[in-house]
Amino acid sequence: MKSEPVASTTRMIELSREECLALLASVPVGRVCFTLKALPAIRPANHLLDGETVVIRTGTGSGLVRRGEGQDILVYEADELDPSTRTGWSVMVTGRAGLVTSPQEAVRYRDLLIPWAGEDLDEIIRLQTDLVTGYRLTR
């Protein structure tokens, strides 16, 4: 016997830019969306927030950004959701991204961003927060 779905009392509330950035800074991992062979691709990534800039550490030749071709557009998303209570939040940042080329900055970010994966992740990508959106699921 199939049970009837229960109406949800959860509401979705739009967050301010400041709330979104604070929530993004509160978690260490999210997902980066980029173009791979003309199609959207998504990968998990750990990040940090440096002011209002998202910094991601990735492998050389990962394809997240193209070398020497200007800045690419990326989307970075992080969330914290509780399926049992149907509450939580989700934040997306869309913006121009480029490789960090300053050796001093790269060393600083490598010290701050310890990779979760055991592979060599030597490229540092800086993502501008041109568009920041987010929602909180609340009861």
Image (cartoon, rainbow, N blue to C red):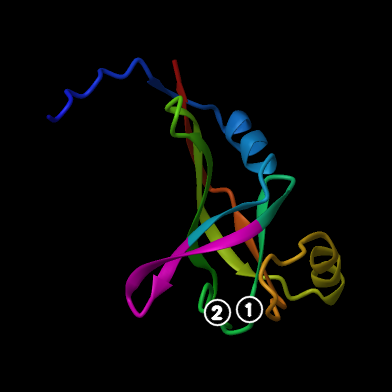
Is residue 93 shown above or below 112?
Answer: above
Query: Is 97 a magenta residue?
Result: no
Magenta residues: mostly which secondary structure? strand
Label placed on residue 78: none
- The kind of residue tagged 2 is Ser
What's the magenta region? 33-46
Query: Against 48, is 10 above or below?
Result: above
Is residue 58 positioned above or below 138 on the image?
A: below
The residue at 51%/78% (across/down) is 63
Q: Which mark is residue 59?
A: 1
Residue 47 is left or right of residue 102, and the answer is left
- Crowding around mark 2 (Cα neighbors within 10 Å: few <14, some 14 to 19, many 20+) is few
Which element carries disc 2, helix, strand or loop?
loop
117 with respect to 70 (left or right): right
Provide residue 123's location: percent of width, then percent of height: 68, 76
Front residue of 21/44: it is: 44
- The quarter in which the N terminus is drawn is top left
From the image, tell me which residue sits under label 2. 62
Q: Amino acid at mark 1?
A: Gly
The 10 Å Cα crowd at callout 1, few under 14, some 14 to 19, many 20 or more, is some
Circle 1 SS class:
loop
**In terms of depth relative to the viewer, which is nearer, 23 or 70?**
23
* Disc 2 + disc 1, Cβ < 8 Å: yes
Q: Is residue 40 magenta?
A: yes
Residue lying furthest front: 1
